[in-house]
Amino acid sequence: MLFSLNRAFSVLVVGLFIGTQIAIADGPSDNMVDQVRRVPKLGVEVSDADRQELTDGLKLLRTKIEKLRDSKSPLAKELLPDVLIFHRAVDQALQYQEFFDAKDIVAAKALLQQGNQRADQLLEGNAPWTKQTGVVVRGYISKIDKTVQPYGLVIPASYKFDGSEKHRLDFWFHGRGEPLSEVNFLNDRSKNTGPISPDNTIVLHPYGRYCNANKLAGEIDSFEALDAVKKQYRIDPDRIAVRGFSMGGAACWQFAVHYPDQWFAANPGAGFSETPDFLLTFQKEKLTPTWYERKLWRMYDCPGYAVNLGQLPTIAYSGDIDIQKQAADLMAAAFELEGMQLLHIIGPMTGHKIHPDSAKEIEARLTESAVRGINHSPSQLRFATFTLKYNQMHWLTIDGMNEHWEEARVAIRPDGDVLNVATKNVSALTIHPPKGLPVRIRIRIDAAPVQDLPESGEFVHSETGWKAGKLSGLRKKHGLQGPIDDALMDSFIFVKPSGACRNETVDKWVRAELDHAVTHWRRQMRGDAIVKLDSEITAEDIAGSNLVLWGDGQANTVLAKIADKLPIRWTGAEVVVGDRSFDGAHHAPIAVYPNPLNPEKYVVLNSGFTYREYDYLNNARQVPKLPDWAVVDVRVPPSSRFPGKIVDADFFNERWEIKSRK
């Protein structure tokens, strides 16, 4: 009983803390595009004595890290990220003035001591933190930019390191916290259990690349952290849940609707579930989006994906008087449109925190769902998506769409030995029926004649209807479907031009935007963008990474090799997109496209992630702002919203071609 009361009190305290962070972080005062405050803010000044002490501690730790790198011990290689997290956290805070309070400096000194202790232990062939219960911080090397990223764990006292039992794991996505540097994250996760600690459950706290509601690179961070945990601990893949509150609740909604077959339950609390209504309700922001921004909201807006939660137990929570109750209310309405009912637990007379009675009910319901685990073989499915980025649920995969960012749907219902399949906006799909259905399966798609299920399970739509087969030629497909921001959700390299662009105005813009992209990748995505000169790009780089090419064909030799294979033609005189032409003296293209040198990877022209400083002020704004291509008038200076004046922009069609506008 005492444990339960303590945990409830912890929930209340954390709820209050998160609420305070939200209150000071954003609001109507953050709707002025010409008065955008810095996120994160600059921290306090560090005294000479503290700076010297931190510098000496970093130097000592770096010496040990180099010894670990040189070690032939497999254990040292494997666990080096668990040491690197301490060095990077303190180094970044010291280098970029990200100690936001004098207490952060004290915490940094303690983290260096912990890092040096781990390094000493690892050099001796020991790693006691890997056998530690309670709170522990660890790290992994990200595939995106090869930087070390931290995550926190709570390992239950019941976990037996020499046992065989697999354990339930709950994600806990954190709330908004603009001062959440790596130092503050590691310090908190080294000391505090956090708002949840279910019995016999490992809790994973992803850092999520800082403060982006676990979107884009933050989304990938969560999966990379989970993969790292699976290598070190015995995790039951059928008993993984996603949970979070406030900004973390928003993260939970999108992980639930996009990956509904990977969790035994979802527990979103407060937060936001879509863009326009939340910003109007919470931010009092009058939106004037372009048509393509409105379409791109569909990447992370959850109501349109609500049908995917039909077989995922979803336990939403809101405080009765919390303005962010709006998120679950909208999702409840979306559920009703699908003939479903959302379980929405509401804390009575409660603001932006979790009521202790509600916390007990949530835990009880999650425990019940965990006993059942994931049903990987449902006999019927209903699935919706707006992009091939999120194209799979259980035994169904949508392989092709007629048009991206419009709703694609598949409903499958068995009738004896026939699977009745109804589709909308789908050009190709794969079906691998679950166990339990008749041995011989036949398929009827969209009321077409019944046909046998091919061994591959692949079907493609043609002029004569649905038939066994798959799409051919250059097509948008999972992992290569755009928009521009998608290229920065996997390994990428910024390819710096060794020469100058044909036009001086364009050249200055290119170099300023490259600097901006590098700076803000570190500031917002907490990594170091890999930057190479065009002359340094290798066959291995082309094979393994998306290439972000800066400059034109004269400045960038890699771009010169593929310029005639891209749908946008860029010469010194003009930028040509289909039947449209723009003066090359002061226009530049931004685009994403399959790399002609390796069509399994992207090339991007002249862009980092496409939301900018204004969007940092509220997490609901942090979504892609540009489609597959855009043309920028660089005479107009970049702003807090755009890299210049966007004079034209659009998506490529499903064959990666310029859309006709006639």
Image (spheres, rainbow, N blue to C red):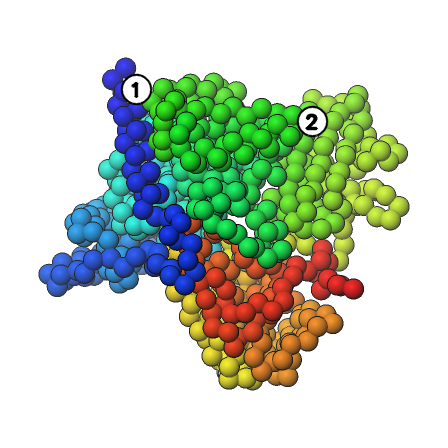
Q: Determine whether, in the image, residue 588 is placed left or right of residue 526.
A: right
Task: Please state if 71 lies on the left or on the right of 399 as rendered.
Answer: left
Amino acid under label 2? Gln
Which corner quadrant of the image does residue 311 belong to? top right
What residue does disc 2 label? Answer: 380
Numbered label attached to residue 352:
none
Q: Residues within 10 Å of mark 2 (few under 14, many from 20)?
A: some
Gap between marks 1 and 2, in whole Å? 39 Å
**Residue 390: percent from left, percent from top:** 60, 44
- Of residues 189 and 628, the one nearer the viewer is 628
Q: Specify the quadrant of the image occupied by residue 626.
A: bottom right
Circle 1: residue type: Ser
* Quadrant showing the C terminus: bottom right
Q: Label 1's element?
A: helix
**Vertical placement of 136 versus 533: above or below?**
above
Indicate the quadrant containing the N terminus: top left, top right, bottom left or bottom right.
top left
Tell me if I can see residue 13 in this picture: yes
**Taking the image as drawn, is residue 109 in sight?**
no
Q: Position of residue 300 (x, y in %)?
A: 54, 45
- Snapshot quadrant of residue 306: top right
Mark 1 neighbour density, 10 Å: few (under 14) some (14–19) many (20 or more)? some
In this view of the protein, which residue sits in the foreground, 448 or 126? 448
Residue at image location 71% in from the left, 58% down from the top? 653
Is 260 drawn above or below residue 576 in the view shown? above
Number of numbered discs visible in the structure rendering = 2
Residue at 48 percent of width and 58 percent of height? 611
Report the residue marked by disc 1.
4
- How far across and down, in percent of the image, does residue 515 sit? 42, 70
- The mark nearer the N terminus, 1 or 2, is 1
Q: Secondary structure beneath disc 2?
A: loop
